[in-house]
Amino acid sequence: MFGATLDRLPMACLWFGCEIVANCFAAAFCRETNRAMPGADAPNIISPLWLSLGENCLPDDILSRHGKKAFSSPYISGRSNIDHAIELEKRDNAGLLDAPNLMHMNYLNAKVVRSKTIVHYDDIFEETVSNGFEFTHHDPLSRKPHREAIERRIQRLLAARGRDNIVFLYHHRISDNSDISRLRCKIREFREFYQSDTASAIVAIFYQNIIPKNDENRLEIKIPDDGILEYVFHTHAIWSGNNPAIFWVRCDDDLIRSMIDDIAAYAQPAPALIA
C-alpha cells in the first residue's frame, strides 16, 4: 500500500504545489481589486478601502501608521473641507487642476498652491481649511509630476465610487464656527456619491473637545447613524503647532486605536450563518 502511494507522490506534490501558487495569485488579485475569492462567502471576504477625506493631513497619517490606508486620495496632503468634496464630486473633480484656477500663495510661512474651483462654502469650518482647496505639499501648477500624481489619485477614487466598499476618515478641525449638526448633514450628502446597490460607504468623523488639564483624556463614541460614525476626542492640547507628538496625535494614539478598532468592527460584515 505504501509503495503505491509513494509512486504517486511526485505527481501529487506537483499538482498540490501548482494549486497553492494559483491560489496565492488569486488571493493577491482579490486583495488588490477588493473582490471575494471564488467560491467564498462574499460578505465575509470583501474588506473596505480605507481612505482619507481631509480636512488636513492627519487622517492619512493615522490610516498609514495603523495599517489601514488603501491608497492616496486627492484629500491626503492638503487643506479642504467637506463642502469642497461635495462640489468636486458633483463635477467629477473637473476644474480642480485647471491652470487658471490655480495660484501660488504664501500661507503660514510656506508656499502653497490653491485651487479656486470651489469658492463657496458654509461658515462652519476653521479658517485654515476655508481658503479654497489647498495643495499644501504639492505644486500642480509648476511641477508636472505633482500634477500627474494628483490626477492618478482622482482617477483611482472615481473608479472606486459606487463599486468598492469604502471607509472615509474625516477630521473636522473644531472652531468657534463649528456646527456638528450641519456637518453631519453634509457628510450624509457626500456619502450618497459612494453608496450604491452593490457597494457601501461609511464616513467616520472625528474632532476634539478641549478639556481642563486635571481631567482625563477620553474618547466619546456617538451612536452610529446610517453609515455615519462620530468620535469626540476629549483631550488637553489642540492638534496643531510644532510638536509632532501633538500635531500627529501620537500623544493620544491609544484613543486613536480605539476609534480605528470601533470603525473596523462597524465596517466588518456579519458572519454568515452556517446551517
Image (cartoon, helix red, strand yellow):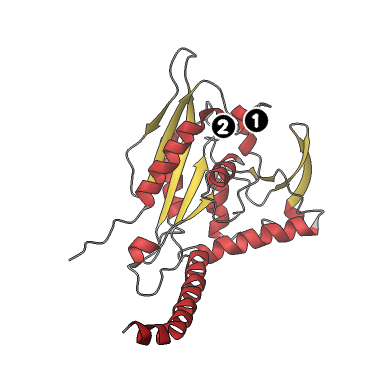
102 sits to left or right of 241 = right
Q: Tell me the crowding category of disc 1: few under 14, some 14 to 19, or many 20 or more residues within 10 angstroms, Cα based.
A: few
Task: State the quadrant of the C terminus.
Answer: bottom left
275 sits to left or right of 120 = left
Percent of width and height locating residue 129: 62, 38
User: Residue 58 has which mark?
Assistant: none
Percent of width and height locating residue 236: 51, 20
Is any atom of residue 274 visible in this view? yes
Picture layout, residue 135 above or below residue 164:
above
Furthest residue in direction top, as rendered: 214
Task: State the quadrant of the N terminus.
Answer: bottom left
Q: Nearer the viewer, residue 159 or 17?
A: 17
Q: Tell me the crowding category of disc 2: few under 14, some 14 to 19, or many 20 or more residues within 10 angstroms, Cα based.
A: some
Furthest residue in direction left, as rendered: 275
The structure residue drawn at horizontal position 61% and vertical position 54%, both measured from the top left corner, is: 72
Asked if disc 2 and disc 1 are in contact, CB closer than 8 Å, the reply is yes
**Tag 2, which secondary structure?**
helix
User: Residue 250 has which mark?
Assistant: 2
Percent of width and height locating residue 26: 48, 73
Q: Which residue is mark 1?
A: 244
Q: Mark 1: which amino acid?
A: Pro
Furthest residue in direction right, as rendered: 142
Q: Mark 2: which amino acid?
A: Arg
Q: Quadrant of residue 181?
A: top left
